[in-house]
Image (cartoon, rainbow, N blue to C red):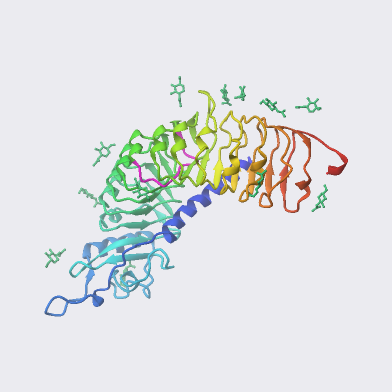
């Protein structure tokens, strides 16, 4: 089905975007200082700081496994990895250097590898165990490669880890419980992989976690109760994974949440009204909820006035469109299609100054189409409803994509098209 394939293409790009966040979105990274710029405290001249020998061996071995090498003009200029751009002010995320490392040489004469990037280098194979010995790593980006095999439980040794991206690879097996030991984690991306089994309840120990990307990762099962502790979460992307059970009420207590994506999961409805406390949400996407236990209402969105994207497609929502929808001034995408919406379309909805995409198809909306439409609104689908009346004059606007089929409009001479 074309709809399915286009949505998986979209998922791919969301995950790619998540990785880009890691590469381009990080700030406040403490740059390692070159030892030559440090004031020498010892009376005798300080020797050149060099990389911890065990880390050199590990890094060389990892790169050898993966068939990659440092660009010698950028770093590893002396044969010692913590050199050149790895220890100067070159930024880890914003530089094109790839593969790349950053080091911390501040302690005595030994440098430690703190950052490692091997992003989109078509690396094939397993993650060598030596990686889990680089215990000073705080940032790791292995996204967009062909890495396969399971994640070792030794990942739990990297307790300084803050930003970790393993997204868009071919990793498999269950997620190790030891991920819960990485209690400094701020962001983790494992999306688009072949993992299996549940989300470890130990992940609930990651109280500093702000971003969790698990789209299309292969995990399944219920969201562990321990996730109630993830109070710092700002972003949770969990689309196209077989998460089941009900959407937990405790998500309503993640008050800093700005982006939530639960599309194409195996959740049973209804959508909990506790989500109404998430007033910081900018993006909310919940689709394809099965609702044998009863239908959802739209009441929970009533205070989410910061939303720019609201997608609640195919959730068997039995309600009318809120009459205060005109207060959602930032809304640019609204998709409420494939529900059981009744009543009329509030004219204020077509008047929202930021709204550009509006999908209301396959509901039971009645009444007429609003006579006025904002100029920003250029993609409208109200097909398969019970709309009546004449077709408004704005339908002939250039660049407007409009689907009106399967309604009960009356055609008069002024709108023969
Ligand atoms: C660093 O350079 C040395 C000497 O040229 C080389 O043996 C080693 O593999 C390089 N390490 C990396 C990580 O590229
Ligand atoms: C660094 O030097 C300090 C003071 O000389 C010493 O106490 C400490 O053990 C050294 N650390 C390492 C890792 O060598
Ligand atoms: C991780 O730490 C455990 C316990 O200290 C140790 O037994 C194991 O060898 C470590 N793994 C690696 C890859 O260093
Ligand atoms: C981590 O989580 C597990 C399971 O949720 C729990 O039993 C354990 O006590 C937690 N560990 C720490 C250090 O909080
Ligand atoms: C939520 O965000 C606020 C404002 O940025 C911050 O002060 C607070 O610590 C955050 N809460 C948690 C649990 O992270
Ligand atoms: C749905 O109803 C069944 C049977 O009453 C119950 O076991 C299940 O927990 C309910 N699911 C949700 C999501 O409420
Ligand atoms: C929608 O919800 C109603 C309860 O309001 C339920 O009877 C019906 O089976 C649901 N439909 C679907 C497709 O889940
Ligand atoms: C749709 O909503 C109407 C009115 O709320 C209700 O009577 C009907 O049962 C709902 N249909 C389904 C399939 O949920
Ligand atoms: C449409 O929006 C304009 C400006 O945002 C406002 O003045 C007007 O009252 C609105 N009309 C309706 C029907 O909401
Ligand atoms: C629209 O449907 C509702 C019931 O859902 C009904 O009360 C109302 O009269 C209908 N309005 C029009 C204009 O048909
Ligand atoms: C659209 O149609 C109306 C009459 O229904 C007409 O007044 C208006 O000029 C047309 N606009 C365009 C862009 O064709
Ligand atoms: C459409 O309109 C016609 C004429 O007004 C009416 O007979 C018919 O029942 C309507 N169909 C629906 C699905 O509302």
Instruction: Using the image, determine if residue 260 lies above or below residue 225.
Output: below
Residue 137: percent from left, percent from top: 29, 58
The residue sitting at 31% across, 47% down in the picture is 152
Residue 134: percent from left, percent from top: 27, 57
Residue 178: percent from left, percent from top: 28, 44
Instruction: Using the image, determine if residue 315 lies above or below residue 167.
Output: above
Q: Is residue 236 magenta?
A: yes
Quadrant containing the C terminus is top right
Magenta part, dominant SS: loop
Q: Seen in the image, is 216 located left or right of residue 340? A: left
Q: Is residue 122 magenta?
A: no
Q: Give the residues in magenta.
A: 230-243
Residue 114: percent from left, percent from top: 29, 61
Give the farthest residue toward the right. Answer: 413
Residue 354 or residue 241, whichever sits in front: 354
Quadrant housing residue 75: bottom left
Residue 105 or residue 78, whichever sits in front: 105
């Amino acid at each position: 089905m074309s709809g399915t394939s286009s949505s998986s293409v979209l998922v791919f790009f969301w995950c790619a975007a998540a990785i880009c966040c890691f590469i381009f979105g990080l700030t406040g990274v403490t740059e390692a200082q070159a030892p030559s710029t440090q004031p020498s405290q010892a009376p005798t001249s300080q020797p050149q700081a060099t990389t911890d020998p065990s880390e050199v061996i590990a890094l060389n071995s990892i790169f050898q496994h993966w068939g990659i090498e440092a660009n010698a003009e950028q770093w590893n200029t002396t044969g010692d990895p913590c050199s050149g751009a790895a220890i100067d002010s070159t930024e880890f995320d914003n530089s094109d250097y790839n593969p790349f490392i950053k080091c911390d040489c501040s302690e005595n004469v030994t440098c430690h590898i703190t950052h490692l990037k091997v992003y989109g280098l078509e690396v094939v194979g397993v993650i060598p165990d030596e990686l889990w010995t680089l215990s000073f790593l705080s940032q790791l980006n292995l996204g967009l490669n062909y890495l396969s095999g399971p994640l070792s439980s030794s990942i739990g040794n990297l307790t300084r880890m803050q930003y970790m991206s393993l997204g868009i690879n071919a990793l498999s097996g269950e997620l190790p419980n030891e991920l819960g030991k990485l209690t400094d984690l701020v962001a983790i991306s494992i999306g688009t992989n072949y993992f299996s089994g549940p989300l470890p309840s130990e992940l609930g120990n990651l109280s500093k976690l702000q971003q969790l990307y698990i789209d299309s990762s292969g995990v399944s099962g219920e969201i562990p109760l321990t996730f109630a502790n993830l109070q710092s979460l700002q972003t949770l992307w969990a689309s196209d994974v077989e998460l089941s059970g009900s959407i937990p009420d405790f998500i309503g207590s993640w008050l800093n949440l700005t982006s939530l994506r639960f599309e194409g999961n195996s959740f049973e409805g209804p959508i909990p009204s506790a989500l109404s406390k998430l007033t910081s949400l900018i993006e909310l996407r919940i689709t394809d909820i099965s609702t044998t236990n009863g239908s959802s209402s739209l009441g929970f969105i009533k205070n989410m006035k910061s939303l720019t994207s609201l997608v609640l497609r195919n959730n068997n929502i039995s309600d009318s469109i809120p009459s205060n929808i005109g207060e959602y001034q930032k809304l640019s995408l609204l998709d409420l299609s494939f529900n059981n919406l009744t009543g009329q379309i509030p004219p204020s909805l077509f008047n929202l100054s930021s709204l550009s995409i509006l999908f209301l198809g396959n509901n039971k909306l009645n009444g007429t189409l609003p006579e006025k439409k904002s100029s920003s609104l250029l993609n409208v689908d109200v097909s398969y409803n019970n709309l009546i009346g004449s077709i408004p004059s704005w339908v002939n606007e250039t660049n407007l994509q409009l689907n009106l089929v399967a309604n009960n409009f009356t055609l008069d001479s002024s709108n023969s098209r």
